[in-house]
Amino acid sequence: MSTFIKGLHQLRLRYITTLLLFMATAATFAQENSLILVSGQVLDAGTKQLITGATVSVKGAVAGTTTNGQGSFSLKTRLKFPFTLVFSYVGFQPQEFVVTNSNSKLNIELNTQTLLGREVVVTASRVPESILKSPVAIEKLDIRAIKESPAPSFYDALENVKGVQMTTSSLTFKIPNTRGFNIPSNYRFMQLVDDVDMQAATLGVPLGNAIGPTELDIASVEITPGAASAIYGMNAINGLSNLLTKSPFNYQGLSVYQRTGVNHVGNNTGRSTSALTETALRYAKAFNNKWAFKVNFSYFKGTDWLADTRTDQNPNNLKSANPNFPALNGANNVAYDAWNKYGDDVLAGSNTVSISGLTIDGKTNQTLNVARTGYYEKDLVNPKVNNLKFDAALHYRINDHTELAYGYRVGTLDGVFQRGNKIQLDNVVVQNHKFELKGSNFTIRTYVSLENSGNSYNVKPLADNLDLSTGGDATTWGNKYKSALNAYAASNGGALTSGNLAAATQYARQMADGSRVVPGTQAFEDQKALIRSINNWDIKSSTIPDAPASGGAALVQKSHMYHAEGQWDLSKYTKVIDVLVGADARVYEVIPDGNSFVDFSRPIADRGTPLPNGSFGNNIYYKKFGGFVQGTKTFFEEKLKIFGSLRYDYNPEFSPKFTPRIAGVYSPNHNNNFRFTYQLGYRFPGLFEALSYVNNGRVKRVGSLPRIDEGLGYLENSYTRASGILFNSAVNAAVANGTDRNAAALANRDLLEKANLQAARPERINSLEFGYKSIFLNDKLTFDIDAYTNTYDGFLGQVQVDVPHGQTVGTDAAVIAMLDANRNSQDRYRVYTNAKNKYRNYGSAAGLTYNFYKKYTVSGNVSFNKIKSNAQADVFVTGFNTPQFTTNVSFGNREIVKNVGFNVVWKWQERFLWESPLVNGYVPGFHVFDVQATYRVPKLKATIKVGGTDIFNKAYIQYAGGPTIGGLYYTAITLDGLLN
């Protein structure tokens, strides 16, 4: 291991050395032509006014500049004549001009952009191409589209994009997904910022825009729905988004942004009306077109949305409740398991107490399954959230074709997100360092991501351990409950009956909870703070005085992620076919905390115990490497373009994988473009899926790598938890009819299902997509439609299994150990493993935009996604978690009168089923209206935007167990291009 660590440090040095070598090499090959000067000015063709901040770039090179406050530009270059300048500005049609000499000043006039379908995208094929001729479905939001969106931020605007399903976990966390199998911690959808992966590895969640660009620095957003792993690697089997920021060479000056708003209006979301604010600053400056820097800062604070849906997911008609006692229906259900309550988790079997030996309605040996009382989420999480972001970048143009850049990005954030359980993030800090060397036909990039979970904690063990530390363990609490039932019976007719059972159970819970701390009291806050401070969720900490015997809830996770990649466009060397090659390497370094990640080389009993030096053992490394080659070729006078790519990925934990993609675009003319794509994709388990070892409410969550199972037995020696529920229900019924409990267990042993879990393997997807994109009516109308079908093999998810401690599955002793009454004879695990069935889903998305009159535009999109059901049940529920139909319709005019514009969006989605290890249930359909009006003050370089989302304040949720969202109303003021 020490050898590997030394090698890792050497690898860090090699990254920097390689960059310096490339910089020196690029400088060596810099052109020695004499320096020439090209200058001129850029005007609005309609008004003849000079344009400040217009971009002037050299086509096929990195050289470029912007116009100053007087609309003039000056560009020094060593390029040979002729070369092409590209002039562009937001809201205007880009224009090209071929420069043949430097003798005269240029006067370039730009026309207002009214034509659609002119965008250029990069993300689909990793090279610039027309959006009309992309081989896969791709959507783009440019600066103008972002400014015209009624969303309060550019990231919120992704919710209106065709095919995108947004999951709001918190004010600070919005996670996009496409084409099904949605989860709040979305491993399958890659999120990039300037091609840097934003996944927080050990937290197991994409950070969305929590440390991403500010509102002032975003240039565009590109979204590719569907599999993209053939050229982006193993995490992009559901799609990816790439947030592209502004170059300090092209966007200079000082910009200021201030947004002020309110949410929780009308108290229909569970909280009182609250203010939210966001402040952002950006400053960029270039020197002699050689050096440039930019600095961004933003701070957001507000009161978070609240998850407080109290739907019972364990109603009394289920085997896991008490169906034989109708008096316990509805509000009287003693096995009540609410969506947003923790410590009452019956379906996981971690918070159920079996009260046996009761006499009810004259029948002896009756059993009640009773859930511990638990605590609601609103009492466990912090309503206030903050998000502080800072980034800076320094760019150096070595010559007209090569640019070197260093970027630093850091964010601190709060909020709530859902993994297996709800996690309260508190002062999480994530940092990125990036070096990039970019030429006209190559890119070399390396970055490191550092994360620290701060004062975060897991909501479920907090609730569990509040109950246990102040209300007693299961046995103690159950004895209090049973004694109180019998005492109630003695005082009310001498017996428990259907008539008094509901009142008796209410009284019994009150008595059993007599010592339990109650929300709103100082004792509750003190105990919560103590449990939050302990990083061992099941075992008493010997290092903290007066620590509760039940354990803690702290989430202490740290990791470093090192990544290097490069790509080289060989097209100018290959005459017959355009060729792009690339390679990447990634190493995760995880510091064991003894609770979420452990050193597996240590004995099982010692993994949660610190060593004398305070560590929990050796750091853990998880590695993957890959490379790809992509070729493109045009035929039939460039009417047909064929794409082919092949990627190779290797993770030492698994066998190597090859990922091919073949695609084609047929364009009989510029206005009509037909496309098809077939690709095979893989996904290695994420860090948490592969290596976690989490004590979580007496159900240990374990990763998918086989070595974790050594000495535990959950793969080969376990029963499924679902079968255990049916088994115990049958046993309780038999005991109620006079059968001995052990004899009843052996008689019902066939109800127990052996799990027979296999060692995990990477997910695999086969994806086929067809599409058509066109423009009509003199480029006033665009239409885009795609249809896809996916087949998932080896889908990764979680299954809960019970291991009979010290016994072999199938033996009499193992069957007896599976009784709820013998809970201490079982080890329970929630295991990341592969589904046994294949899953097929299919769907389509269509979008239309029509500039029908002057600057009036109407647009709309509709998405359809469906999964084909399997006849045979699987070891776990995969959770498609996607509405069958969703739609967005917008209507607006960016300048209805001079300097005033507006936009209105209507969003609708239908009811759908949500399934997850935490919560199952139906998400109601909803429809909402978002609106904004914009007023520009050119003399002050200011824009005032007033708007609201869900303006009629109809409360809704986006996923089961998620927060209730309502109206959000805001005013935003932007000052742009100051000090330019």
Image: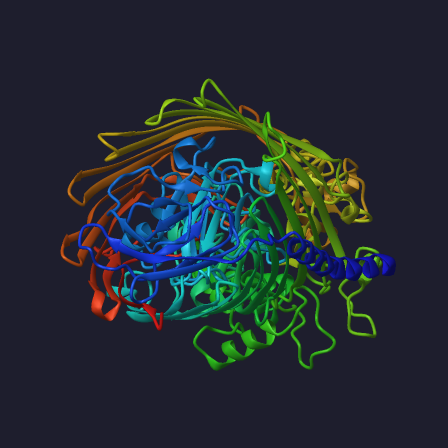
Q: Position of residue 873 (x, y in %)?
A: 57, 29
Q: How many marks?
A: 0
Q: Is residue 824 above or below residue 785?
A: below
Q: Position of residue 791 (x, y in %)?
A: 55, 27
Q: Is residue 118 above or below residue 405?
A: above
Q: Which quarter of the rendering shows the N terminus?
A: bottom right
Q: Tell me, what colour scheme is on the image?
A: rainbow
Q: Position of residue 786 (x, y in %)?
A: 40, 29
823 and 519: which one is in front?
519
Instruction: Please tell me in which quadrant of the rendered image residue 945 appears.
Output: bottom left
Q: Which quarter of the rendering shows the C terminus?
A: bottom left
What residue is drawn where x is 53% and y is 23%? Answer: 871
From the viewer's perspective, tell me whether residue 133 is left or right of residue 41. right
Q: Position of residue 836 (x, y in %)?
A: 64, 30
What residue is drawn where x is 43% and y is 34%? Answer: 137
Instruction: Please tell me in which quadrant of the rendered image residue 254 appears.
Output: bottom left
89 and 153: which one is in front?
89
From the viewer's perspective, tell me whether residue 644 is left or right of residue 774. right
403 and 895: which one is in front?
403
* In the image, farthest residue toward the front: 103
363 and 564: which one is in front?
564
* In the image, farthest residue toward the right: 3
What residue is drawn where x is 49% and y is 54%? Answer: 63
